[in-house]
Amino acid sequence: VNHEQTVQNSTKHVSSSLVLNHSQCALDLHPQFFPTHLSVGKLRNFHRIPLRRFQPHEINSLINVNSLLRRFGKIEPKLEFPKSFTQQPQTVTEFNQIRSSSDLTASDNCHLILAEYSEQYPPLMMQPGMATRIRNYYKKKFSKDEGPQNGEYGELVYVSSSPFLGVLKPGENLLAFENSMFRAPIYRHKIPEQDFLVVKSKSFGYVIRGDIRNLFVVGQECPLIEVPGPNSKRSNSFLKDFLQAFLVRLFHESHEVPKRIKMEDVKKAFPTLPENSIRKRLKICADFKRINKLDANWWVLKDDIRLPTEEEVRGLISPEQCCAYYSMLAAEQRLKDAGYGEKNFWASDDDDEDNSKIDDEVKNAPWHTTRAYLDAIKGKCLLQINGVADPTGRGEGFSYVRQAIKNKDDDEKEREKEKEKEKEKEKLNDSVSSPQAQTKRTVTGTDADLRKLHLSQAKELLASYGVPEHEIKKLKRWEIIDVVRTMSTQKAKEGNGAGISKFARGNKFSQSDAHDKFKDECQRIFELQNRNLASEEYLSTDDSEDLEEDSDVD
Amino acid sequence: MTSINQKPSNFVEIENQFILRMPTIKSDNGVLRPHPATALLRELLSETKTNEELSVDPLKDRLFIELNPDTRKGRVKFDNEIFEARLVDLPCILESLKTTDKKVFYKSADICQMLICRTKDDPFSNSDNEKEKEKNQSEFKKFQWSHGLAPPLKNVRRKRFRKTAKKKYIDYAEIEK
């Protein structure tokens, strides 16, 4: 378990005192930004929704394109967001005054960047209105090193150990997107000379911007939260909370006394939920009534029910949870479209042998990759690194799939086999009585048998190895024994484990070897990704292909 | 998106954003370079930032876009030049983010499409070979752009996206709807 600590330490990142606040519409889970339901079409075009909302007069007629000047008359040198945009409101009244979703427009004079995700299906994507920060991770060359000079973007963070799977060399820096969902290295590029951003809106028509020059390529995400699996407990309970939040907000919007809502509105927002379960929810807080004959059926809020406040609803579900949930839905749709049945959506976690029977596509699903990555960070497993879930499909990304490590059962089996062998040898030895047999002694029945090691003794051993007490307390018996074995093995290798080497199990495939290999591979991919995605070279080695591809344009 | 009947106060228009790519032309030595209109457009736009006296939009009655989202065909008119344009789907998820301090960024929108212009006499498209090729492409694939905007994402569809292993025969027509 030595390696667990290393992984943990190396991925610990410098925490910032700043809280990352989303814009108000994200905090509110504004239904236009955080839809309660995504249609199949929307899921298939997840974050790739084509241009829409064309007015009839817009189609097939020349529309004047304006610069920002048209809208503002005069352009202020620099736009500041209203305070409400970046700060949490202090009071409820303040909160009510803020409708800042229009602040998300790109047709004002704000500084704008573009981010292009290198992964086809990043496991976690922000909805509009959500915030991310850019960090500039830098590894100091010497203690008074003042950091990189290219610090236009991001807050500078000195790293002692890397927050990525690979480590930075002294003097190296790496920019990264960082939010509550993921951390991802980003690479600065220029937007091609011929490219302009055009913003199309009903209120302002077409607005073109020529001042956007920075384009960041986003490398493979390091997820910080788990995407729930389809029909998992987590996703079902999220949906329940989502419904709950929706109901409360719907009641809030009612101006009748007492407040009332219509089942149709709820059903429209959650078409996949059976009416039964919606009704069950509603019954707790409302009564079904026919108000008058014209618009008959209402659910009327009970007198004795206090409606939760906006803040309380906010505590119920977060924008991040919504994103994770959407990611699950989109991946589920992709799997269905690729012909995978619902039964195959889950890979078993406990039984590593089973892992190999699961389809590669399913291993790629975000509920598997995020889980595997997070487990690896916690030191619960190693990742394959090279393999089927590599999003680049050509060895330039990390495959977030659990490495099948020999688990305890395997160890037991192996031990059994060894015992058999020992016995056979003993039989031989009985007849030959070779002194060599003494060195290949069996541990069963001796005081070196790990299975008979008392917990208290094991704890003492760990303490003597210098493992802090609070760490030991967290471990269960088998984990403690595991640490004893690993550390003893290591000490024995180093040649200073006089009395304790009896617990060393050197003849097995060593976990620390596997871990070293894992670290090396991580570093290799880490450097490869950094090199490739930072490269400004427009490779022209495959011009023939390009011709073919470019012919897409006419 | 499904949402409840929004009250006007709560309703916001979500913007559409797209990339406009001005045409390239082939120089005498065969190298592709931006059409002169590109530089002019950029200059006009930068004027709005630098020239404080400016009160009339320098683009007024100069730049026009015509677009039919169904056929994905369009035209871009800049002064007296008219470029043929086509709306293509970008391969990578592209998002626009705004900031005041270059440290914290707010996502504005997803940008999924690019309007690509080309000159009518672009020598690139006129080879019969290419026209033939295009005919053979499905209507769907024709509008799938292969390249990201950034240099390392050139040919990203082919080179960087791992291929999905299909389980069985899929009705593509259904998917593409």
Image (spheres, coloured by chain):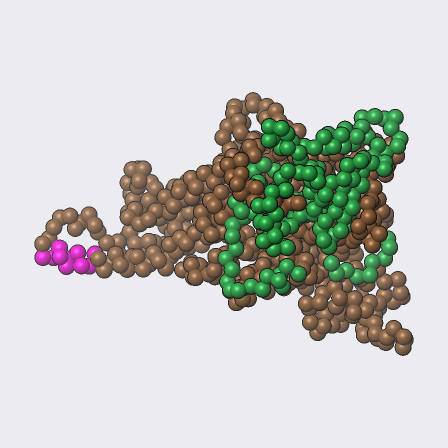
The reply to whether residue A302 is in sight is no
Is A216 one of the magenta-colored residues? no
At x 13%, y 57%, the residue is: A428
- Chain B in the picture: what colour? green
Task: Please tell me which residue lies in front, A502 or A340.
Answer: A340
| Colour-to-chain, brown | A
The magenta span reads: A422-431
| Residue A262 is at least partly visible in this image | yes
- In the rendered image, the residue lying farthest to the front is B128
Query: Is A507 placed left or right of A291 in the picture?
Result: left
Q: As rendered, which of B117 and B51 lies closer to the eye?
A: B117
Q: Residue at point 86% right, 53% down?
A: B9
Q: Whole-percent x and y of residue A331?
A: 59, 57
Task: Indicate the quadrant where residue A517 lies.
Answer: top left
Q: Give the image quarter of residue A110.
A: top right
| Residue A36 image point, x, y percent | 72, 60
Q: Where's residue B118, x and y in %? A: 69, 40
- At which x and y percent is residue A18? 68, 38
Check if residue A429 falls in the magenta segment: yes
The residue at the far top in this view is A144
Query: Residue drawn at (39%, 51%), measured in percent from left and top?
Result: A482
Q: Which quadrant: the C terminus of chain A? A: top right
Q: B84 and A447: which one is in front?
A: B84
Secondary structure predominantly adopted by residues drawn in magenta: helix
Q: How many marks?
A: 0
What's the residue at 33%, 58% (across, down)? A412
